[in-house]
Amino acid sequence: MNIVYMGTPDFAVKPLEKIINERHNVLGVFTQPDKPKGRGYSVTPPPVKECALKHGIPVYQPVSMKNGEAFEILSELKPDVIVVVAYGKILPKNILELPKYGCINVHASLLPKYRGAGPIQWCVLNGEQKTGVTTMNMAEGLDTGDMLFKSETQIGENETASELHDRLSVMGAELIVKTLTAVENNTLVPQKQNDEESSYAPMLTKELCNIDWSKSAQEVHNKVRGLNSWPVAVTFANGKRLKVFSTRIVEAKGEAGTVIKEKPLTVACGDKSVEILEVQPEGKKRMSADDYVRGYRIAKGTVFG
């Protein structure tokens, strides 16, 4: 089948590789423009672009999908279907209706729950115990199209959003191939979403980062897991900013925000406590909590907040 693929970040790489390996004909890849990244702000191509070029696939990076340029390119390519995975741009109606089999999206949630830009992170932030991926026919609304296939998975008790992201990317790759096979065999049975069951997962912001130690240990743990690896949960110790990447819940109790044990580094919450496993002090690299305690002389009774 002749396919145009649209995607940008790491999450979209595995599905593209899987489609290529299944011998589909990828006519071209659309991805976001290269952007400055890192401390040196060097211009960096998106992961999907790097993957496409490695396989010799033409890459297109329109700034806008609405000025006619993208539609003209797609009209010349004549794809049977457009596959969209975390592209980051809204497709206008004329593009949605262009391919013979329409546009199919891989979304990282069990729709209609968690429509929007941050489904993986918000599942973890909200303490969900299961999630998955859904393929759907794209419509003009935000993740509102008819569902095609779903694949479900349990979320681990200590699993971070970053770890879940990687698992769901692989699951999405398997599901899009299954969906494309059904398209070819004309066996798809689209299912409408129930809007009353829908929820929204907005893009993450740094305003979410500060840890409130008066919250339950589960809520603090969920925040740390859900914001790993970006934008990362934050607290302050001895006036210095401290990023917290990894925790686990323990039964110990104490005054919220207080270090009740140095090794392993344990901080009391509103009910139980969390053991902190990995941190990044201000201006330093990521390190184990044990190394942090040793180097920064964090003592029992230190207040985080």
Image (tube, rainbow, N blue to C red):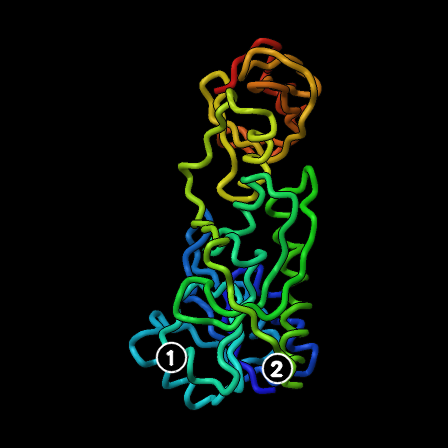
- Label 1, on which residue? 70
Where residue 78 sits in the image (x, y, percent)? 48, 89
Residue at the spot 40% in from the left edge and 79% down from the top edge: 95
Residue at the spot 64% in from the left edge and 76% down from the top edge: 19
**Which label sits in the foreground, 1 or 2?**
2
- Label 2, on which residue? 183
The type of residue carrying mark 2 is: Val
- Work out whether residue 273 or residue 199 is closer to the camera in this orientation and state it: 199
Q: How many marks?
A: 2
The type of residue carrying mark 1 is: Ala
- Work out whether residue 258 or residue 33 is closer to the camera in this orientation and state it: 258
Disc 2 element: helix
Where residue 260 sits in the image (x, y, percent)? 63, 12
Disc 1 element: helix
Report if residue 293 is visible in the image.
Answer: yes
Q: Is residue 76 above or below residue 257?
A: below
